[in-house]
Image (cartoon, rainbow, N blue to C red):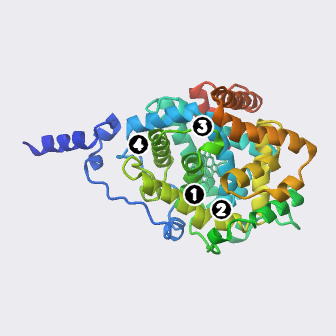
Amino acid sequence: MKSSKLFLLLIILKCGNCTKDQNARPECALPNNSTTVSINDILKLGENSSGDSGTTSIFPCWFNLDLSRTGQIFAQKYYGQILFANVMSLILLLSDYQTRRVLFLTQKSETPDKASKRYLATAQQIHLWYHSDILSPDWAKSVTNVRKVHSYASFYVDSLNGTESKLTATPKENPTGFQPNERLWSAFKLDLGNFDTRTRPQEFDYSAPKFKFNQYTMAMTIWAFMALPVLNPEPLGIARPSEKELQGYAHLWAVIAYAVGTDEQYIFCKDPQIDWQKCKSYLMDLFREHILPQLMNLDFEGELMIESMLSGISKIIPRYPVDALLINLLEEHLGVRATNLRRQRTLQSRVFGTIANNFVSRYSNYFRPVRWLAGKAMFAELQLASRKVFRDFGTNFTVVANKHFYS
Ligand code: HEM
């Protein structure tokens, strides 16, 4: 057999369900040696790598079209529940110092008003990634535009000189105009102090990154989008998902991560059908080693960015009180009783917060129509918010992919 034919055969054998894009790429015929960096190395290696991998293809060689579509179907079925998971995870992500610094410095989400627009724009791109054909031009346009937005943001934050980049908010000097609720945060911290002492984390090693927008922060952000539905689906109202569905969802996020410029070494769960246990352990370890220690040492800037995000979200999903969202995180996902947070609640929070949390984490699990209703209600709220911010309902994928950005 001629060598070119052998080469083609190799590609076909390797890429049983790949796209045309991959079949045309010679590198996809070669064995893939890109293992994921270890949990111990991810911070020090990642913070020295630029936030964009520089790849020019949308899809990686390990792209599995069928599995990604399984992930999309799962995400469509549970869109409302997954969005709620993202809110919970954002609390955790904003505890990460390096990621939060970038978001603070770009000044697009440090007040509730700004945050509601910024996260609405994000939710709409994500809606498109779940609901449109993954091989369509709209899908490609959306991820390419997000990459461009990141590139501007990265250039901007790196261009700030040393003094300016220390710009932050403290209780004494807060340029944002938004004041976090002191009582709420001291109650939250008291409750978090009851975290199981046997699993209490070590001190976190805060360091100075070479690039502010870097591969470590990319990995942390992917964690925020992927982890909770995989690790703890039931309290989100995702009732008894199949392993295949969760693997599809994890793979879909690995593909999105690649498309928006994450280096393959920093992408986990690329092949979850083979490495499922490894994928879940990686997600758990990232939480334990990198997120939890930072959550337990949250500073004023962290409180401000988290409360601003939660208050911004409650503008989109009205009547979901901020403390009820924190209670949900503590009790349903971290396994800590929120005694102090419950004590400081207002009457409104006692009534609406309790109903909302029961709706999300209890009834949705048992009653299918409730789950369906929760998803529909969430999307309807997003549509209304979209009408106010972008002057259309955000249902046309081409318009969303091209125009629905806050930046
Ligand atoms: C897989 C990883 C990521 C995904 C899927 C993602 C997704 C998005 C999306 C959809 C937007 C558009 C929202 C808008 O128009 O405001 C956006 C904007 C932005 N993202 Fe990301 N992102 C990721 C990683 C990161 C990381 C690691 C950082 C920072 C360290 C970051 C910082 C930003 C910034 C600064 C903006 C512009 C809006 C702002 O200033 O807040 N992103 N991202």
- In which quadrant is the C terminus drawn? top right
Q: Position of residue 223 (x, y in %)?
A: 56, 53
Q: Residues within 10 Å of mark 4 (few under 14, many from 20)?
A: many
Q: Secondary structure at mark 2?
A: loop
Q: Which residue is under mark 2?
A: 96
Does the residue at mark 3 contact the one at mark 1 (Cβ under 8 Å)?
no
Q: Secondary structure at mark 1?
A: helix
Sequence-wise, which precedes: disc 4 or disc 1? Answer: 4
Does the residue at mark 2 contact the one at mark 4 (Cβ under 8 Å)?
no
Q: Amino acid at mark 4?
A: Phe
Label at residue 59 = 4
CA separation in Å, label 2 and label 1: 8 Å
Ligand 1 closer than 8 Å to the CB at disc 3? Answer: yes
181 left or right of 332 in image: right
Q: Amino acid at mark 3?
A: Gln
Label at residue 137 = none
CA separation in Å, label 4 and label 1: 21 Å
Does the residue at mark 2 contact the one at mark 1 (Cβ under 8 Å)?
yes
Ligand 1 closer than 8 Å to the CB at disc 2? Answer: no
